[in-house]
Amino acid sequence: IRKGDRILLVDGVSVSFDGFKALNNLSFSIDYGELRCIIGANGAGKSTMMDVVTGKTKPDVGQVIFGDAIDLLSMDEPSIADVGIGRKFQKPTVFQNNTVFENLELAMKDDKRFFKTIFSKLNSAQKDKIEHTMNLIGLKELYNKEAGILSHGQKQWLEIGMLIMQEPKLLLVDEPVAGMTPQEVENTAQILTDLSKENAVVVVEHDMEFIRSIASKVTVLHEGSVLAEGNMDAIQNNEKVRKVYLGE
Ligand code: ADP
Ligand code: MG
């Protein structure tokens, strides 16, 4: 796997709900090492797209390929998670009564972790992994604090950390900065940027300042297909986008 290789291909995907096309011949691809922002009005098909990639919804037609040749449409949700696709929903769900460290430990990808941590100590590779993740999400100093006392932003980062512990190759993140302070938004941009260097991250967001600060490629969805794709400046000057969003 090399940076710049394709990690996800969505090709000609359509999804209908009672005859209504939530996705309509949707095609795009994501590369390793990429941080892609997906924007679009309510109902554009962003969540349905994530449902298709994670296996929650199966399309009527189209292809979804992970890496070189893994056909995601032939797999169920748990198998898709196992090959390395993680999804973060909007609301953070952390174990309130456990510490930051314990939350990351509990999320670790390791079938035998329960027995390891009950009957023996974490090994040094496991400790390093937790340490690395705490650095990435900026919660190292708070390792011993219960998750319940964290701010909304810190809980979001902890949940991102819990996903990282499962070693995803592709992470789908739904509106990570909703309800965050400007400083928290800035930190989140940094965390997702760092994370995308080791993997690939797809962020669905409404916050344009945030998207601009990430400064990576943006895909605009409209009525279930791609309306435009490019950097933020290209998007803001795109005629089709201006027509749809600004009524020009
Ligand atoms: P977005 O996340 O961009 O706001 P969605 O993917 O949630 O958009 O929805 C796209 C369209 O599909 C919307 O019109 C929505 O009402 C419709 N839709 C989504 N899920 C369902 C469903 N389970 N049943 C019927 N219609 C749905
Ligand atoms: Mg949505």
Image (cartoon, grey):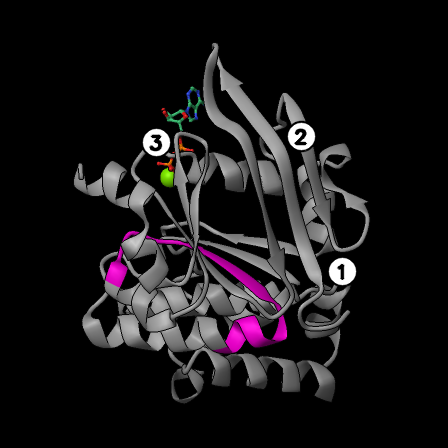
| Mark in front: 1 vs 3 | 3
Image coordinates of residue 164 in percent, x first then y, are 58, 68
Q: Secondary structure at mark 3?
A: loop
Q: Earlier in the sequence, mark 2 or mark 3?
A: 3
Q: Nearer the viewer, residue 29 or 112?
A: 29
Q: Amino acid at mark 1?
A: Asp
| Circle 3 Cα neighbour tier, 10 Å, few/some/many (<14 / 14–19 / ≥20) | some
Cβ atoms under marks 1 and 3 closer than 8 Å: no
Identify the residue position indicated by label 3 in the image. Answer: 43
User: Mark 2 belongs to which amino acid?
Assistant: Gly
What is the x, y in percent for residue 85?
64, 54
Circle 2 is placed at which residue position? Answer: 62
**Viewer-proximal residue among 169 and 92:** 169
Q: Write the residue at 45% across / 31% down.
A: 224
Mark 1, residue position: 111
- Position of the N terminus, as image quadrant, is bottom right
Q: CA distance from mark 2 to mark 3?
A: 20 Å
In the rendering, which numbered label is found on residue 147? none
Tell me the SS state at disc 2: strand
| Type of the residue with mark 3 | Gly
- What residue do we see at 80% from left, 54% from top? 68
Q: Residue 97, position in %: x, y?
A: 40, 65
Q: Is residue 115 left or right of residue 13?
A: right
The boundaries of the magenta stretch are 194-208
Q: Secondary structure at mark 1?
A: loop
Q: Is residue 147 visible?
A: no
